[in-house]
Image (cartoon, grey):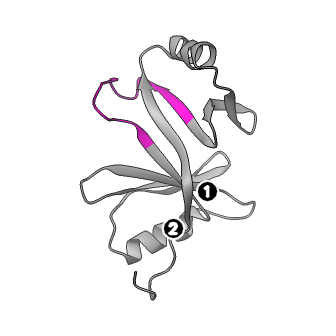
């Protein structure tokens, strides 16, 4: 690791998103059959808890498949700083950090072209980078 590069601030996996065809049916499956508890961000239900990871169900997002296709979101200390640190490493930003509700959210591409999302709480008074 190059000590002159800024820290990325990556903390943990926060969200795994799966495509679903029928959201109501999928919600019943994860709640009734698997016994998962609902996950909330503020007052909005956003998915189901898997320990400290949110399983987010995304209807009309992609066609479900047996091949790997989940979306992975990494929690970071401060997403705008993470974006700058990724750029300093020559990593391609796929989606610039923006504020969505109470969170900064952005994405980058790995060496194979896989998109990895990252997010952090948006603090009052902060603004997303331009």
Q: Position of residue 54 (x, y in %)?
A: 59, 38
> Residue at 63% of width from left, 25% of height from top?
36
> Residue at 65% of width from left, 45% of height from top?
101
Alpha carbon separation for disc pair 2 and 1 = 10 Å
Mark 2 and mark 1 lie on one chain; the one further toward the N terminus is 2
Looking at the figure, which quarter contains the N terminus? bottom left
Packing grade of label 1 (10 A; few <14, some 14-19, many >=20) is many
Instruction: Write down the residue under mark 2.
Output: 82
Instruction: Tell whether position 66 is magenta.
Output: yes
Packing grade of label 2 (10 A; few <14, some 14-19, many >=20) is many
Q: Position of residue 89 (x, y in %)?
A: 36, 75
Type of secondary structure dominating the magenta stretch: loop
> Residue at 24% of width from left, 54% of height from top?
112
Residue 129 appearing in the image: no
42 relative position to 34: left or right: right
Nearer to me, 69 or 59: 69
Residue 22 appearing in the image: yes
**Which range is magenta?**
55-71
Q: Position of residue 99 (x, y in %)?
A: 59, 52
Q: Are marks 2 and 1 in contact (CB under 8 Å)?
A: yes
Residue 90, picture quadrant: bottom left
Q: Secondary structure at mark 1?
A: strand
Q: Secondary structure at mark 2?
A: helix
121 relative position to 10: left or right: right
Q: Position of residue 65 (x, y in %)?
A: 30, 24
**On screen, 76 above or below 117?**
below
> Residue at 26% of width from left, 53% of height from top?
113
Q: Which mark is residue 120?
A: 1
Nearer to me, 129 or 70: 70
Nearer to me, 42 or 112: 112
């Amino acid at each position: 690791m190059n000590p002159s590069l800024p820290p990325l601030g990556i903390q943990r996996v926060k969200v795994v998103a799966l495509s679903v065809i029928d959201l109501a049916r999928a919600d019943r499956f994860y709640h009734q059959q698997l016994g998962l508890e609902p996950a909330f961000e503020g007052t909005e239900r956003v998915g189901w808890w898997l320990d400290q990871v949110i399983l987010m169900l995304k209807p009309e997002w992609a066609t479900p498949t047996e091949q790997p296709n989940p979306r992975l979101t990494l929690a970071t200390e401060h997403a705008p700083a993470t974006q700058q640190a990724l750029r300093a490493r020559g990593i391609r930003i796929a989606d610039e950090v923006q504020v969505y509700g109470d969170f900064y959210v952005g994405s980058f591409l790995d060496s194979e072209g896989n998109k990895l999302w990252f997010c952090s709480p948006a603090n009052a008074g902060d603004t997303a980078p331009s």
